[in-house]
Image (cartoon, rainbow, N blue to C red):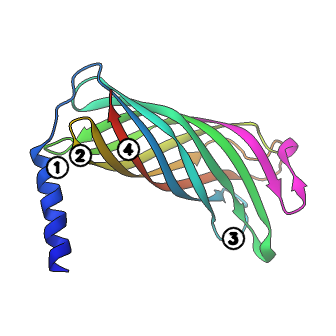
Amino acid sequence: MKKILLSIVAILAFSFANAQSREKGAIELIPQIGYSSANYYGEESLASNTLSGVSFGVGADYFFNDRWSLRSGLHYQKMGAKGSGGYEEKLNYITLPANANWHFGSTRKWNLNFGPSFSLLTSAKNNDGDIKKYINSFQIGLAYGIGYKIEVNEKFSILIDLQGISGLNEVYKDSDFTIKNAYSSINVGGVFKL
């Protein structure tokens, strides 16, 4: 245990010592993969467990200075929920976030991001088959997250982050009750400085 703790301290110290400041116009490309969980929230939702899955995509940060960047990209995300008796609704989206990304800490390795996300439905299924015609094809959400970069060298870092989305519009097209998507993921990605 002591060796593991010393290794972690050494990696963090190395990361802090090799911090690079970002200039205006700098771009970082971030392919990533993660583990996600989703559920519904609202007036009536499936009394359920979360629906888990894999998320993946590519993001990019455009830096305005060493504190602020604009983060966007394209991500494949699995949303929906599990109900009682083995019932499931699986909704797959392609999501485009447009988030302000605040880099903080003495080396700017930490970041908080927040902003709107725009999702297009690619498929929707339950236990009985295709339900895409009943689901809104477009979702606007509020995205938010926190992450940390571990610098490997001057041009490459590893990003570990937690991301969440709260859907702002209804899941179903015509419904007498309110159901919206709730989504979260833990991701690992490579950060390439262009």
Amino acid tagged 1? Ser
Write down the residue under mark 3. Answer: 48
Point out the tag, 3 or 4, that comes first from the N-terminus: 3
Q: Would residue 148 be found to the left or right of residue 107 on screen?
A: right
Q: Which residue is mark 2?
A: 151
Q: Which residue is mark 1?
A: 15
N-terminal label among 4 and 2? 2
Mark 1 residue element? helix
Q: Within 10 angstroms of label 2, few (less than 14), some, or many (20 or more) residues?
A: many
User: What span is colored magenta in the figure?
Assistant: 117-134
For disc 1, the neighbor class at 10 Å (few under 14, some 14 to 19, many from 20) is some
Q: Residue at x 19, y 64 (%)?
A: 8
Compared to residue 80, the image places residue 173 above or below, namely above
Residue 45, x across and y down, in percent = 71, 61
Question: Marks 3 and 1, how far apart in space?
Answer: 42 Å
Residue at x 41%, y 38% (from the top left corner): 30
- Which element is circle 2 on? strand
